[in-house]
Structure formats: C-alpha cells, structure tokens
C-alpha cells in the first residue's frame, strides 16, 4: 500500500519504493557527509521486512528528499541511516516532516532510535538535537577517517538518562 499525504499543497510523503531508487540515489550527491551507491540502497531496502523509508515528492511525483532507517528487533532499536533534501526544497520543514514520520513508525516496544553522525556534520548535530536526540558518545574513525557522534532518541526520557549514565 502506498502512503500518500499532501503537504503544503505541493509535496507528498510516500513510502520509499524500488521505483524511487534512481532518484533517491541521485539525491545522495546533496548529502553533507557521504554518498551511498545505488547498489547500497538496494541492499539496505532488500527483502527484509524491517528496512523502511519515506520520500517527499513534488506534485510531479519526483522525489525531492528522503529518509532511510532500519528496524533491528534483536536490539529493540531503530537505526537512522540518512536524510537528504534537495537544496532547492530546503528550509520548508520537509526534513522535520520526514523525521516525525520516522519516529511515528518506531515499534512501541523499541527502546531507541540510534543515529551515528560524522563529527564534522554540525548541521546534522543541530537538526537531531532540535528533534530531541541526545549525544550519547563518540566513536573513533567510524566513517573511515572521521569520528562519529552517536545520537539517541527515545520517547522514554528515563531510558536516555540510564544510557547516558552508563557511558
């Protein structure tokens, strides 16, 4: 089933589908940290029932942004993979919209959403903090030559306090 919701009369939020792969892979050039090749997108979407994502399309059905995440039931966590909005469509709250849609789809029994972010991607740090993510720790050389900050989000603020206290 395709989920379509009009946004501001110009945009639609839809499930990420295979027929969007070429457009979504092309949007990666606007990512501020790394580009994933088309083959990696296909692998991430795979046949696993826990890979998910949404795209924002214009009225022409062409994706102008996406969010990609994966549920890990064994960890009771969702892993935020990437969010990219085409520069011509930024500052319209589309990234925030996609983040809210992702958060709503985290299974109720999951404890966290985890988001590793390059240490030099300060724009993403600020964005995640605005969306109630907390910096949990740093991982050295996580992205090849760059370190990564691990941000966590949970509806249960006590879970975040417990996790941060263990650090």
Image (tube, rainbow, N blue to C red):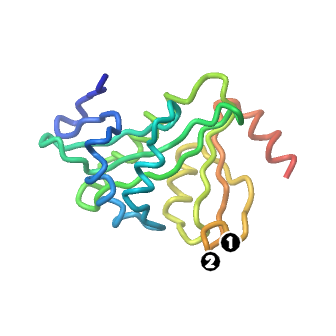
| Residue 6, horizontal then vertical, whole percent | 23, 31
Find disc 1 in the rendering and name its residue.
141
- Residue depicted at x 63% and y 46%: 114
The N terminus - image quarter: top left
- Residue in front for this viewpoint, 100 or 111: 111
| Residue 122, horizontal then vertical, whole percent | 54, 66
Find disc 2 in the rendering and name its residue.
145
Please identify the quarter of the rendering in which residue 5 is found: top left
- Residue depicted at x 58% and y 51%: 129
> What numbered label is drawn on residue 119?
none
Left or right position of 155 against 139:
left
| Residue 26, horizontal then vertical, whole percent | 29, 60
Question: Decide: marks 1, 2 in contact (CB < 8 A)?
Answer: yes
- Residue in front for this viewpoint, 43 or 56: 43
Disc 1/disc 2 C-alpha distance (Å): 5 Å
- Secondary structure of the residue carrying tag 2 is loop
């Amino acid at each position: 089933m395709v989920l379509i919701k009009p946004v501001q009369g110009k945009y639609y939020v839809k499930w990420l589908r295979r027929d969007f792969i070429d457009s979504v892979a092309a949007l990666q050039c606007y990512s501020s940290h790394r580009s994933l090749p088309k083959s990696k997108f296909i692998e991430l979407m795979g046949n696993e029932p826990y890979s998910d994502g949404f795209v924002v399309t214009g009225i022409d059905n062409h994706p102008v942004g996406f969010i990609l995440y994966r549920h890990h039931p064994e960890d009771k966590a969702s892993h935020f993979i990437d969010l990219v909005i085409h520069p011509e469509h930024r500052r319209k709250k589309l990234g925030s919209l996609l983040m809210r849609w992702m958060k709503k789809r985290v299974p109720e029994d999951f404890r966290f959403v985890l988001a590793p972010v390059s240490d030099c991607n300060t724009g993403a740090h600020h964005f995640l903090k605005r969306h109630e993510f907390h910096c949990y720790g740093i991982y050295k050389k996580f992205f090849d030559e760059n370190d990564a900050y691990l941000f966590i989000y949970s509806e249960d603020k006590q879970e975040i306090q417990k996790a941060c206290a263990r650090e």
